[in-house]
Amino acid sequence: MRTSRLEAFSDGVLAIIITIMVLELEVPHGETFADLREATGIGLLTYVLSFVYIGIYWNNHHHMFQLVDRISAGVLWANLHLLFWLSLYPFTTAWMDESDLARVPTTVYGINLIAAAIAYYVLQLRIFAAEGPDGPLRRAVGRDLKGKLSPVIYLCGIVAAASGSEEREWTSWLAVGFFAVVAILWLIPDQRIERTIREAEATG
Amino acid sequence: MRTSRLEAFSDGVLAIIITIMVLELEVPHGETFADLREATGIGLLTYVLSFVYIGIYWNNHHHMFQLVDRISAGVLWANLHLLFWLSLYPFTTAWMDESDLARVPTTVYGINLIAAAIAYYVLQLRIFAAEGPDGPLRRAVGRDLKGKLSPVIYLCGIVAAASGSEEREWTSWLAVGFFAVVAILWLIPDQRIERTIREAEATG
Amino acid sequence: MRTSRLEAFSDGVLAIIITIMVLELEVPHGETFADLREATGIGLLTYVLSFVYIGIYWNNHHHMFQLVDRISAGVLWANLHLLFWLSLYPFTTAWMDESDLARVPTTVYGINLIAAAIAYYVLQLRIFAAEGPDGPLRRAVGRDLKGKLSPVIYLCGIVAAASGSEEREWTSWLAVGFFAVVAILWLIPDQRIERTIREAEATG
Amino acid sequence: MRTSRLEAFSDGVLAIIITIMVLELEVPHGETFADLREATGIGLLTYVLSFVYIGIYWNNHHHMFQLVDRISAGVLWANLHLLFWLSLYPFTTAWMDESDLARVPTTVYGINLIAAAIAYYVLQLRIFAAEGPDGPLRRAVGRDLKGKLSPVIYLCGIVAAASGSEEREWTSWLAVGFFAVVAILWLIPDQRIERTIREAEATG
């Protein structure tokens, strides 16, 4: 089974997700910069965050499938499972945005992020299973420090968001900070961060 | 005539259908889990169901066209006919969801499901006709137990939904149950279910 | 210059146009078949009509570019010009639908149809110019009876729609009838209609 | 790393951007040409402008990547950065349109245009870096007169828009005029304008 059509379909879904999020951005009713800030303040921030996330998933998906030759039915469904969680990003992003980073919506956004991360991990496992014990992807992924670190940071963000209350509104910002850290972690080119971590391990 | 562009166009349409359904999910107005449940309760359930259906159609479409070499004008139009019924999924899903699984909307959803199934069957027949009496798809499809069983279960769901009344609201849930059974039937990998049926036939 | 990316981009735009029209379909507020008929009555009819039109354009576009090897900058822009008029279909369809086939919206819809037909014709001319005096597309298109007949029928529809008044509401239906005739003309497989016309010419 | 999937993903995003802008066009509430003019007057104008811009970016993107063989992680992210600014076009176009070309929205639209132009330039630099000092794209781009002229004209437009006041509403139209000039500059086939400029330099 060729991977080209799976890649084309995934590209289509990711392209639509990344673009329809802008439809959730509320067009300001007034004509001033203050109206723009009021209408989109948090919206633009969360849009950028979710845009970067989808970009990272597309990027990693792209790299992963360059090493994949044959796919099983399990890989097809694991891929759709990943796309399902990613397709909820516009929805959870819009809720978090419209509620001005309220406690529950921010927690739900974090759960969406971690669910997509788990779905990506499951997809990787299905590909490992399809390619056999010594496949090229398995060797390329290696210890996968980022992949193991990300859910931990997501979890920190979810706990931070969930621990908020009316007096402590900064917890949502802390949560968004954790979520942003994961995005930055993936934006830094691989070799550099791996080398950084290796050096830290050597000196630490 | 090459199949690549037909596949690319179908992928595009299916990718858009599967993604725009999330636009129909109503963003909760409040900030609590109760608001989320109220706003999306049935919406999320029906979204998952329709997502899985489109995933199954993409999956089957993908498999089918791997065995197709040449397409006729009839195949092109039969394919568009299938895409037409699938493009109505976001609409019928939204109606069923917004009416809280009322009698008529659930019945109409079932009619949409069976219409797509028939369109898929017609597409298969057009491909059979284009490839001649001993084509590879005809041999691969074989007896096509799932394909013959699905409309029967859909029909059960439609009858269940249509038989509802104000006193008997559970009929809609029964209908959704029937529709979910078809989805599960297609999610189980082919070989296993075929073997199961074969064994059941041998022992029965 | 390769045609593959022009085809992929056009496929993407056409796939989106054909799918977002369903977003214009108003989800009924009630739960009965009467609510469905009230909410979508004309909407579903015009949706089918526009769906078939986009399908025909995709089909013809697909056939045309199978005969095209090299494209010029002029072809690229003529193609975008065609996509522009087609991208207005969801808008003009929605207006015609929401106004219940009022005089001006139906006329505007017809103008949109004829503008797209002219844009398609211009695209064909640009390809002729790019491929030289004896190109394969020029020979394949031949006398292009359908292509010459369509604008005439569109014009009849536009005149019918524009001649409507409050007393004569049937003129809009007549116009839609003319528009439907063009669609049916293109749905009939080529050879048959050409043969029919040839026989009519022989006996006439 | 192959460029095909980057091109497919970019095509998808550009196709969606160019098509969803039509969703922002407000369907007229009345049934007359006056209603159409009132509802879409500026909307249709700005829609055409943004449509042409996305078309130009697609066109240039298409040409650029025909000369690119291998891409780095930096190119992938520079491409996503470009798509990010382009994905804001429907939003800034809608705001400018709904405010009837008010001072701030028109300025913001200009900022969006210049940001996309800078992102395109950064993408070009990343490709230069990836292909080495004597790459084919670097030689093809040459002095890139248009690319250097465009930001200057955009800046004129932004200054014009920003200098508006309640008494001077024509400044927004001047700004849109500047923005249109850039579009026309790119619509004119390359050789001709380059020759024109060369002749102007020779005689000047």
Image (cartoon, coloured by chain):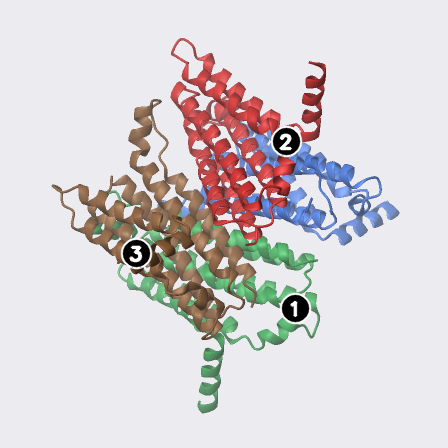
Chain colours: A blue, B red, C brown, D green
Residue tagged 1: D128
Identify the secondary structure beneath mark 3.
helix
Q: Residue flagged by tag 1: what amino acid is it? A: Phe
- Crowdedness near tag 2: few (<14), some (14–19) or many (≥20) residues, C-alpha within 10 Å: many
Q: Looking at this view, is A50 or A122 the one in front?
A: A122
Numbered badge on residue C200 = 3
The answer to whether residue A153 is visible is: no
Identify the secondary structure beneath mark 2.
helix
Tell which subunit mark 3 falls on.
Answer: C
Q: Residue flagged by tag 3: what amino acid is it? A: Ala
Q: Do marks 2 and 1 share a subunit?
A: no
Q: Residue flagged by tag 2: what amino acid is it? A: Ile
Query: Which dot, 2 or 1, sits closer to the camera?
Result: 1
- Residue B90 spot, x, y in % from top left: 45, 34
Q: CA distance from mark 1 to mark 3?
A: 63 Å
Residue tagged 2: A158
